Image (spheres, rainbow, N blue to C red):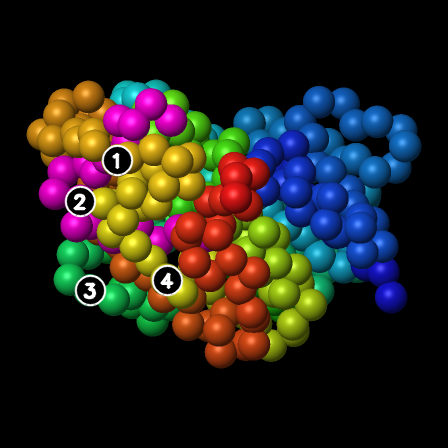
């Protein structure tokens, strides 16, 4: 039986792929857009800055997937960029959660994007959904982000916070920045290369979201990461191997901090060894559990 799903951030990397997957299995998709919604019935307008949501259009949906948020990958984070990152997640989520809580016919579930930035950088630790939040800007944002969903759970709607790892996709910021260097043989580790990267293929991001929609027993935070995290050095070597080049480059950790500032410390040099325990326990089977096959699928190489 088909269901109706509303998606914010539907034009983004994950949102566009999710929309395609839902429609492919026969579900109906409503896109939440900031511009004037079309009259075709498959769009609803929302404007987080103005505190506006077309509540009437959201009535009767079975699920809402909230993916919208300011991109975090940039050269450096200034104060204005950091405020956009925080407000787009926290205030946007709170606006949508409050709107859903007031519906006469609310959805069964709200899937709200989150991130493994929740855990901060934790060298030497293996992290799962029971781990406490970490320290730093991204950890603080993630804590507020997930807390902003409270009106939904208080209204009796099932809430799932998908803590995404680094998404392996040729259009993701991490890959697009490393790929040109890898293709000329200059891809390599950053810092000592020992920091863990908890990654996930786009196909498994979509698979995990669909799994969370369909499985009513899944609630609360779930880590959407491969069961096989790698070190920064292993990631660089695997990417270079996927494009048939050696990995001979190296960026000192100090240079990463000088060039990228706080973003470099919290993203590029962060050590996050995260396990997707709740996904595995619920029976989800990863399509791309190993990095090399995930990269080759993403890049279209053999």
Q: Residue at x 41, y 52 (%)?
A: 291
Sequence-wise first label, 3 or 2:
3
Return the residue at label 4. Answer: 228
Whole-percent x and y of residue 156? 63, 68
Q: Is the residue 293 above or below the residue 33 in the image? A: below
Residue designated by label 2: 193
Q: CA distance from mark 3 to mark 4?
A: 15 Å
Q: CA distance from mark 3 to mark 1?
A: 27 Å
Cα distance in 3D space between marks 4 and 2: 17 Å
Q: Nearer the observer, disc 3 or disc 4?
A: 4
- Tell me the quarter of the image containing the N terminus: bottom right
Q: Residue 276 in magenta?
A: no
Give the residue pinned by disc 1.
Answer: 247
Q: Position of residue 40 (x, y in %)?
A: 90, 32
Magenta stretch in the rendered image: 183-200
Say which of marks 2 and 1 sits in front: 1
Q: Position of residue 151 (x, y in %)?
A: 56, 57
Question: How busy is the neighbourhood of tag 1: few (under 14 within 10 Å), some, or many (20 plus)?
Answer: many
- Look at mark 3 in the image and give the residue it sits on: 125
Label pair 3/2, CB-CB below 8 angstroms: no
């Amino acid at each position: 039986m088909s269901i109706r799903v509303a998606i914010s951030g539907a034009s983004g990397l994950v949102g566009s792929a999710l929309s395609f997957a839902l429609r492919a299995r026969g579900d109906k998709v409503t896109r939440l857009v900031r511009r004037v919604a079309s009259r075709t019935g498959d769009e609803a307008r929302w404007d987080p800055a103005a505190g506006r949501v077309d509540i009437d259009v959201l009535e009767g949906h079975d699920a809402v997937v909230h993916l919208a948020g300011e991109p975090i990958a940039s050269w450096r984070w200034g104060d204005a960029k950091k405020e956009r990152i925080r407000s787009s997640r926290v205030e946007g989520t709170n606006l949508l959660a409050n709107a859903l809580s007031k519906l006469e016919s609310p959805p069964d579930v709200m899937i709200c994007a989150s991130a493994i930035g929740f855990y901060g950088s934790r060298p030497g630790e293996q992290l799962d959904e029971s781990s406490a939040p970490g320290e730093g800007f991204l950890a603080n944002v993630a804590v507020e982000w997930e807390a902003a969903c409270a009106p939904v759970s208080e209204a009796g709607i099932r809430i799932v916070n998908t803590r995404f790892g680094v998404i392996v996709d040729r259009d993701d910021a991490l890959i697009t920045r490393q790929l040109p260097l890898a293709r000329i043989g200059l891809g390599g580790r950053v810092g000592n290369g020992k920091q863990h990267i908890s990654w996930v293929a786009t196909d498994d991001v979509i698979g995990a979201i669909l799994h969370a929609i369909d499985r009513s027993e899944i609630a609360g935070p779930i880590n959407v990461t491969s069961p096989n995290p790698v070190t920064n050095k292993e990631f660089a070597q695997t990417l270079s191997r996927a494009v048939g080049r050696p990995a001979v480059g190296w960026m000192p950790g100090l240079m990463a901090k000088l060039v990228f500032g706080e973003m470099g410390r919290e993203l590029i040099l962060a050590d996050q060894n995260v396990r997707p325990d709740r996904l595995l326990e619920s029976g989800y089977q990863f399509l791309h559990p190993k990095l090399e096959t995930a990269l080759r699928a993403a890049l279209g190489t053999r």
